[in-house]
Amino acid sequence: MRSLAARLALAFSLLVLPLGALFVWGALDAARRYHQEIAQNQYRGLAANLLHKSPDLMVGGERAGALDALAAELAMTNPGVEVYLLDAEGRIVGASPPMDALVRKRVDLRPLERFVRGEGRGPLLGDDPKRLGGRQVFSAAPVPGGGWVYVLLSDQALDSVAEAVAGSTVLRLAFWAGLGLVLLAALVAAGTAWGLTRRLTALEAAMERFDPAAEAGPPDPPAGERDEIDRLHARFAELAARVRALLASEREADRHRRELVAGVSHDLRTPLAVLSGYLETLEHERDRLGEDEQTRYLAAARAQAERLGRMIDDLFALARLESGAWPFRPEPLALAELVQDVALEWKPRFGAAGVELELPPPPGPVEVRADAGLVERALVNLLANALAHTPAGGRVRVEVGEEPGRAWVAVADSGPGIAPEDLPRLFERAYNKRAGGSGLGLAIAQQAARLHGGRIEVESAPGAGSRFVLHLPAEAAQAR
């Protein structure tokens, strides 16, 4: 009974069988009452006729001698009819059956009074003196001077449902037809339960077979959503596809993570080895080195330490940005002024590398709401990327602008450009490693833009330079 189909079939059967039995019982009871009503209507005037035929049945509320002859006559014509003589209080003073066979000595007169007045719908039942608690259809007529003639229209074949079925071919057929309908309803209930649970069973099997790590695709959803089961199947198919996509993304992220760890480990090993070499030289050869050589060795060791610090800082920054742990604090920010300050700070570095840094004046104040430190870091990384790719004699141009719904900063260089096959992976971690860099600059800049709800787009072609554009969406921009 652990199957849902079996439980539904049992529940339907427990519902249908009692209802069917109730229907059969109700039908038989209606048939019995129908026969009672016919009998009462047919013999409605029997008591009055008996009184008219034998007016001396009651004398002063007492039984007269004519009842015995009347009872003998009725026994020959209708053995199921019983005649009782009642006084004004309903006490039995005479009866066609033997008095010692009566278990009641008094009859309730209220049904008799309603019968005479013609009240009530359906058969009226009166007390049966021979059965305690028994009731039967009757005919009644008041006796002048007090008392009643009370005739019970007893029909033993209709006293119970079992007797009615046993005594009537039609009722027997109706009984067996009703029983057959009940059994048929139980079979239909079982078939309906199986039909309702068949698709649920198929969905359960699909869920058990589903393996997110397998190469096979998710279970096919039904062609059309007809009901809740089809919608559940469709939602499961969507969930399975989403789980597979998440697992694929996780595997891809894990691959990138392994590549990053391997690359960063290699990159960290290089400055650490150089730094260790310089320090060991200073430690063991300090007496043989001149002051200028010691100063040069210390400067080289400091440069390697700073490089190592930048790489570690970039790793922590990217990890905090990707995990959402970065303390994001947006505030009103003059974007054009920030770009100008960063560009002026980097201008000496460009000059030392022989690269011209162009900063045309902005069209006007560009106000945004953003995290100033995060935007500044993204701009610094874009400038560092442009400087690393632009040879001596080249130029880098920084522009600021604002359009409806967005503000933007563009950094364009005259470098060698980017191959088309490299563009899709340009913002991946450690894909753009430079000498002296961590290869995380563009990844950090892109994460900073996404944290603001924006993005960085790149336009490039081999030999035509590159143009990186930082976009801030309308949610971050403010009206002037």
Image (cartoon, grey):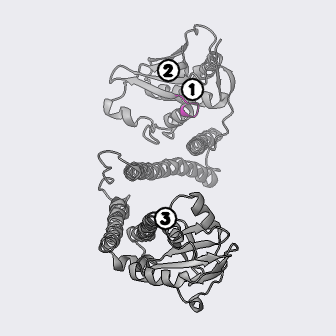
For marks 2 and 3 on the same chain, the one whose residue lies earlier in the sequence: 3
Label 2 secondary element: strand
Q: Which residues are magenta?
A: 450-454
The answer to whether residue 225 is left or right of residue 366 is: left
User: Could you tell me the amino acid type at mark 2?
Assistant: Val
User: Which is nearer the eye, 358 or 446?
Assistant: 446
Q: Please name the residue that numbered disc 2 is placed on.
A: 411
Q: Where is residue 474, by image quadrant?
A: top right
Within-10-Å neighbours for mark 2: few <14, some 14–19, many 20+ = many
Label 3 secondary element: loop
Q: Please name the residue that numbered disc 3 is placed on.
A: 44
Q: Position of residue 269 (x, y in %)?
A: 51, 51
Within-10-Å neighbours for mark 3: few <14, some 14–19, many 20+ = many
Secondary structure mainly formed by the magenta segment: loop
Q: Position of residue 433 (x, y in %)?
A: 45, 39
Check if residue 453 falls in the magenta segment.
yes
Q: Please name the residue that numbered disc 1 is placed on.
A: 379
Q: Nearer the viewer, mark 1 or mark 3?
A: 3
Circles 2 and 1 in contact, beta carbons < 8 Å = yes
